[in-house]
Amino acid sequence: MHVSFWSWLAVIGFILAMLAVDLFAHRRAHVIKVREAAAWSALWTAFGVGFGLLVWRIYGPEFGQQYFAGYLIEKSLAVDNVFIWAIIFTYFVVPREYQHRVLFFGVLGALVFRGIFIAAGSAIIANAGWVLYLFAAFLLITGIRMILHRNSHLEPEKSRILALFRSRVPMTDKFHGQRFLIRKNGVILATPLLAVLVLVEATDIVFAVDSIPAIFAVTDEVFLVFTANAFAILGLRAMYFLLADLIHRFVYLKVGLALVLVWVGIKMFLKIDIYYIPTTISLAVIATILGVSIGASLWATRGQERRALPAPDNPPFGNATAEDLAALDALWRQGRGLQRQGQKRRS
């Protein structure tokens, strides 16, 4: 599969342009409701599927199917990531109108980290083919562990990343709107929103460790690996607002995701020296596993309504009052005024 430099540039340019559109559309903090989330989710899915059809038309059915297999894997694993985000936001009681800002920068960071991991993984595979055995073993072990620990959940209060961040970075104990940083008494402080962003980025990296080897099991083409990841990730924010209140209904999804990881691990192991499972079969197996797990989940929980996760009785952070925000604005203006006075004195 030969992909020109201009094709890479066009895809990356399109991704950056859509991120800019998304940021502009959500420049003002507001609660994203189900209808808006559904519309954005449909748009991002249309872009992902449309790009796959374009790959199919230009490069042929084999590469088209490889893209869709990778896209389906990434999209399904992203659902589990969405549920982790819901747990994080609920624990910190992040106001819903500020969540999109965190997720925007979280997704932006995820794209950067995925790009780095994909480039590193491709280079390692090209120079040390035996690493595929390690990838296959890792996927099998991860899938089995996911089945065994399917009822366990993230506990943000026990996060070492959060503890390290709070011990090293001066931080306020109140949310100050959408700000990640504030100035107080001449000192720059992180807000809890920045701590939440750090934790979101950390979970993105953990999920990338699972998903990158999984997608390399269905395609060796770096262009397809990157684009399948990118188009799946771009829809994560909308997917979160669409599914966050439905976590309780996807009771068998984690088992389905675990079986997908086991399947692609077996596929990767076999294709090294034994047998290459056709992409058509692989795509059908992945789609069937996910379809059955989601269908069984919705059937088992039929009749249940949307509901948010229960918030803790004693939230770790509070919200700044109107007086706090007003004082903060005055501090910023005062800081700029002092800077201008200092510059005049030096001149």
Image (cartoon, grey):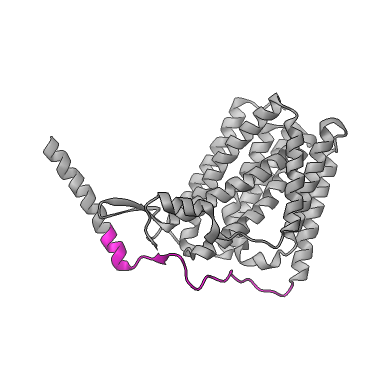
Where residue 35 sits: x, y (%)? 58, 64
Main secondary structure type of the part rendered in magenta: loop
Q: Magenta segment, which residues?
A: 302-328
Q: Is 316 in the magenta?
A: yes
Q: Residue furthest right?
A: 275
The answer to which of 126 and 20 lies nearer the viewer is 126
Residue 331 left/right relative to 236 = left
Number of on-image labels = 0
Answer whether residue 53 is visible to the viewer in this image. no
x 71%, y 58%: residue: 149
Where residue 7 sits: x, y (%)? 61, 30
The answer to which of 27 and 94 lies nearer the viewer is 94
x 47%, y 62%: residue: 97
Where residue 347 sits: x, y (%)? 13, 34
Q: Quadrant of residue 237?
A: bottom right
Where residue 199 sits: x, y (%)? 52, 52
Compared to residue 68, the image places residue 324 above or below, namely below
Residue 56 left/right relative to 339 = right
Residue 206 left/right relative to 330 = right
Q: Is 44 in the magenta?
A: no
x 65%, y 52%: residue: 78
x 72%, y 32%: residue: 131
The answer to which of 311 and 347 lies nearer the viewer is 311
